[in-house]
Amino acid sequence: QVQLVESRGGLVQAGGSLRLSCAVSRSRFNIRAMGWYSQTPGKQRELVATITSGGSTNYADSVKGRFTISRDNAKNTVYLQMNSLKPEDTAVYYCHTDAETPGGIVYNYWGQGTQVTVSS
């Protein structure tokens, strides 16, 4: 099976930085795209950033220029470097991956979520 283990988030002042990581244990699955999503109470989960297995990235407009997603394929780990944090970045951040079975079936997997709080 596939399990995603996220690093702990935290409390940071506005303008500060935080780095999240998510390690994927994958058994026989092939890890494809990886990404980070955020969710605040009463709202739907939203895309923050994604990265393909080849390294192509996509960002939400609200984080472009401030956040950087990267991955280490050898370690099956995805990172989110968050700089110039704003109070509106406060959310629970979820790691996500598409994992493909040897038979070619693709499943979605989510991490447990980690709270990031940015104080003003």
Image: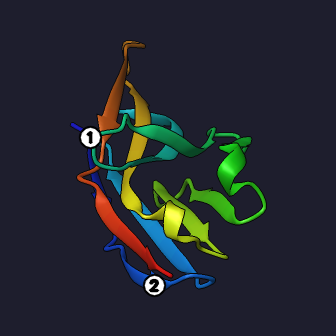
- Mark nearer the viewer, 1 or 2: 2
Residue 89 screen position, x and y as percent: 51, 62
C-beta proximity under 8 Å, tags 1 and 2? no
Q: Nearer the viewer, residue 99 or 62?
A: 62
Mark 2 — residue? 12
Residue 111 visible from this viewpoint: yes
Q: Quadrant of the N terminus?
A: top left
Q: Residue at x 34, y 70 (%)?
A: 7
Residue 70 screen position, x and y as percent: 63, 58
Earlier residue among tags 1 and 2:
1
Q: Nearer the viewer, residue 84 or 94?
A: 84
The mark found on residue 2 in the picture is: 1
Q: Residue at x 28, y 40 (%)?
A: 42
Look at label 1 and name its amino acid: Val
Residue 112 against residue 21 in the figure, above or below = above
- Seen in the image, is 46 located left or right of residue 53? left
